[in-house]
Image (cartoon, grey):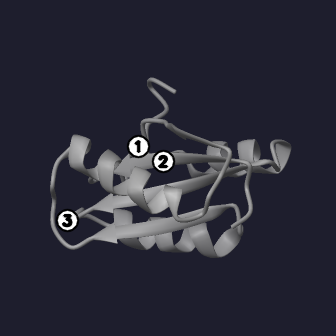
Amino acid sequence: MTARILVVVPCYNEEDRLDCSAFRAFAERNTDCGFLFVNDGSTDNTGELLRELCRSNSAFLLHELPRNCGKAEAVRQGMLKAMEFKPAYIGMWDADLAAP
């Protein structure tokens, strides 16, 4: 991942809310931006949905937490992981795009 901007997206049981097509469209239009999805121990099909999304585009990365830790900890873990890629900027969006 060599994106200049990396956006952390915490996800917990987002199978019915995650708009994969919106993320794909944004990534195609904004090639300097990547996404790090953090699966926060989801118990629905979110993990598989995220794995499929990440296989579809190299702008998408996945960090999976073994159990639910809550949004704040998922964001913190995502930020720590994002720093490993050394982007110029790191941000956060909600998975349902309610508060980008």
Q: CA distance from mark 1 to mark 3?
A: 14 Å
Residue labelled with disc 1: 17
Where is residue 36 drawn, in percent x and y? 52, 57
45 vs 34, nearest the viewer: 34
- Left or right: where 12 falls relative to 91: left
Q: CA distance from mark 3 to mark 2?
A: 20 Å
Disc 3: which residue: 43
**The N terminus, quarter of image:** bottom right
Which of marks 3 and 1 precedes in the sequence? 1
Q: Amino acid at mark 2?
A: Val
Residue 54 image position (x, y, % from top left): 59, 69
Tag 2 residue: 8
User: Residue, x 43% and y 42% (percent of image)?
Assistant: 95
Q: Amino acid at mark 3?
A: Thr
Q: Position of residue 24 (x, y in %)?
A: 70, 52
At 74% across and 49% down in the image, what residue appears? 4
Element on which disc 2 rests: strand
- Secondary structure under the numbered disc 3 in the rendered image: loop
Disc number at residue 32?
none
What residue sits 37% from the left and 48% below the top?
10
16 vs 44, left or right, is right
Name the N-terminal-most of marks 3 and 2. Answer: 2
